[in-house]
């Protein structure tokens, strides 16, 4: 039997998911030996988009896409990936829910370009030149760029078979996911590859796991207000931790390092809108109503990783 | 056909729904644009319900619960107001008109208040016009 | 296959009879880059351009975020 073929495409991401795959270390050797990597661009393999387009439809067994869909090039290649791959996996939170880069949906493209290319303290651009989709240099060299659009998770562009959360996915979890893929023990199509437990369920700080009961938060604290206690629940102490609603495949790495969870693992399966569920969970943990108004910058907090996949999807511009 | 608002009222079974009942038996009139959804407690109202109602075409969402101290489940309405206030903050920052969502405490004996609140809410939504969110943000 | 054949295979007509080689994407790095090389009639390189295809917009959406959250947010500018 020939080896299963794997393709990996990094769309509007940062390459962190690729590095997380490399973090598999020795396991990667075992996994890579069982796979035939036909396309891994732009990070690892020396493959071009034309090579991918030339492959026969449905010839690749597993396709991974990390990063959200942000411009016309991403959209095109993601559609090509869908044609060529039998199973397409949204790998990492950007592809699954939009990711941090999905926060661009809070602004219009004009606002973003204006800030990045014209209106910053360190920018010197008196002619106010902005990126163009086509430009002709010296009257004869025609150059093209893809056009920008709102950030979208993968499943708003093509059908996605599986989702893997995490920013980046935790390497042990990737190992398990790869092993499940290779052995064919996969959940039904359209579901998340996860153990299905929340961060709180695997967190050492969880008072319920220590046999105590959970208390309400009486203050709202920021991490700059001082370090939390050694083993107490961060939420009880007032550090807004999104552990209750986030997938815990990471093994609760952030709370164990005194850092509150920000929800990169993605929603527990069955939740449609991560941010709204987080609002619900955090609000019901607060001791009094005044604390609600003390939460700094709630949109960036609750929708840090999931804005494009939310009900609203973006800020409404009037 | 002229535009008529569609208002979703999520009413708690023990107070606001009973209040709506009383408004009916006392023959107070309130606008026919109101569609009541009964829930066991205002604490059952997830922010997702409000957002989904708005996306699916409701022009306004009104949540009715018991007064503080009256909750059949002791603290459901305390949770409701925290969730609602936080949701309203986030939704406002995302560009939803804050007046499209409202939370009020209406007890089982306040049939008149229910009818008055509905009339006022209907008038407010008519002023705001159709919901731009219908079918997702543009 | 000789070098000439490879060049023949990958080149395409650019504007005004020029030949154009597009290297898309640049590989073995993070971030999307694109190189466009223009060849003259004789097949020599006349001009070459490097374009960075990605635009993110961190400059704008970081505004208003609490300062302690910024380091863990901007680490996704590049994850390598």
Image (spheres, coloured by chain):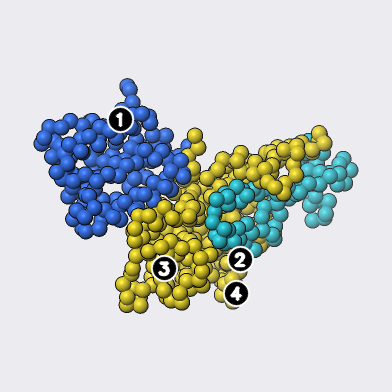
Chain colours: A yellow, B blue, C cyan
Are dots 2 and 3 on a single chain? yes
Specify whether A311 is left or right of A98: left
Q: Nearer the viewer, residue A76 or A92?
A: A92
- Label pair 2/3, CB-CB below 8 angstroms: no
Q: Chain of mark 1?
A: B
Q: Write down the chain letter for disc 3.
A: A
* Mark number displayed over residue B123: 1
Callout 4: helix, strand or loop?
loop
Residue A296 locus on image (x, y percent): 48, 55
Badge 3 and badge 1 in a common chain = no
Chain label for disc 4:
A
Which residue in the structure is indicated by mark 4?
A25
Would you call the spot at circle 3 few (<14 residues within 10 Å), some (14-19), or many (20 or more)?
some
Along the line of sight, the residue nearer the viewer: A74 or A106: A106
Circle 1: is it few (<14), some (14-19), or many (20+) Cα within 10 Å? few
Point out residue A255 in the picture as x, y percentages from the top left corner.
47, 70
- Whether residue A195 is visible to the viewer of this picture, yes or no, is no
Do badges 4 and 1 share one subunit? no
Residue at numbered disc 2: A19
Q: Is residue B64 above or below residue A139?
A: below
Determine the image quadrant of residue B59.
Answer: top left
Q: Residue at image x 43%, y 55%?
A: A294
Q: Residue at point 72% right, 38% down?
A: A128
* Gap between marks 3 and 4 measured at Cα: 37 Å
Secondary structure, mark 3, is helix
Earlier sequence position, callout 3 versus callout 4: 4
**Chain-order first, disc 2 or disc 3:** 2
Closer to us: mark 4 or mark 1?
1
**Residue at disc 1, secondary structure:** helix
- Tag 2, which secondary structure? helix
Asked whether disc 4 touches disc 1, contact meaning CB atoms under 8 Å apart, the reply is: no
Q: Nearer the viewer, mark 3 or mark 4?
A: 3
């Amino acid at each position: 039997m020939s080896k299963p073929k794997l393709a990996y495409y990094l769309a509007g991401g940062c390459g962190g998911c690729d590095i997380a795959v490399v973090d598999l270390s020795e396991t990667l050797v075992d996994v890579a030996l069982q796979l035939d990597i036909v396309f891994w661009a732009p990070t690892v393999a020396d493959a071009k988009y034309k090579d991918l387009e030339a492959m026969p439809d449905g010839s690749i067994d597993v396709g991974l896409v990390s990063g959200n869909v942000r411009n016309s090039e991403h959209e095109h290649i993601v559609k090509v990936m869908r044609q060529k791959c039998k199973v397409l996996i949204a790998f990492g939170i950007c592809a699954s829910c939009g990711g941090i880069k999905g926060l661009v949906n809070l602004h219009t493209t004009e606002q973003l370009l204006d800030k990045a290319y014209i209106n910053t303290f360190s920018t010197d651009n008196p002619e106010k030149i902005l990126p163009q989709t086509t430009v002709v240099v010296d009257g004869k060299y025609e150059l093209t760029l893809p056009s920008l659009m709102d950030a979208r998770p993968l499943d708003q562009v093509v059908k996605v078979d599986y989702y893997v959360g995490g920013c980046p996915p935790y390497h042990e979890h990737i190992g398990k996911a790869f092993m499940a893929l290779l052995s064919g023990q996969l959940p039904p199509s359209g579901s998340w590859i996860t153990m299905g437990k929340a961060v709180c369920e695997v967190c050492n700080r969880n008072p319920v796991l220590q046999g105590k009961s959970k208390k309400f938060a009486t203050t709202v604290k920021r991490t700059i207000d001082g370090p939390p206690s050694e083993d107490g629940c961060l939420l009880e102490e007032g550090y807004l931790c999104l552990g209750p609603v986030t997938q815990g495949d990471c093994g609760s790495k952030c709370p164990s390092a005194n850092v509150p969870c920000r929800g990169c693992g993605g929603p527990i399966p069955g939740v449609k809108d991560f941010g709204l569920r987080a609002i619900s969970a955090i609000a019901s943990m607060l001791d009094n109503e005044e604390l609600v108004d003390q939460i700094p910058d709630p949109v960036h907090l609750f929708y840090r990783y999931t804005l494009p996949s939310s009900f609203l999807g973006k800020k409404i511009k009037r | 056909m002229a535009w008529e608002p569609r208002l979703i009222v999520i009413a708690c079974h023990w107070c606001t729904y009973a209040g709506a009942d009383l408004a009916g038996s006392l023959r107070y009139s309130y606008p026919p644009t109101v569609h009541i959804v009964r829930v066991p407690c205002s604490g059952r109202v997830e922010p997702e319900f409000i957002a989904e109602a708005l996306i699916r075409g409701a022009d306004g969402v009104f949540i009715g619960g018991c007064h503080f101290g009256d909750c059949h489940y002791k603290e459901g309405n305390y949770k409701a107001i925290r969730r609602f206030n936080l949701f309203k903050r986030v939704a406002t920052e995302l560009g939803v008109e804050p007046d499209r969502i409202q939370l009020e405490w209406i007890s089982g004996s306040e049939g008149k208040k229910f009818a008055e609140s509905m009339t006022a809410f209907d008038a407010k939504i008519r002023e705001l016009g159709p919901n731009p969110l219908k079918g997702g943000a543009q | 296959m000789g070098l000439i054949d490879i060049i023949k295979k990958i080149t395409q007509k650019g504007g005004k009879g020029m030949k154009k080689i597009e290297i898309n994407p640049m590989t073995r790095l993070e971030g999307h880059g694109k190189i466009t090389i223009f060849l003259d009639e004789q097949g020599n390189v006349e001009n070459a351009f490097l374009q960075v295809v990605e635009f993110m917009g961190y400059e704008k959406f970081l505004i208003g975020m609490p300062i302690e959250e910024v380091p863990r947010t901007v680490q996704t500018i590049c994850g390598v």
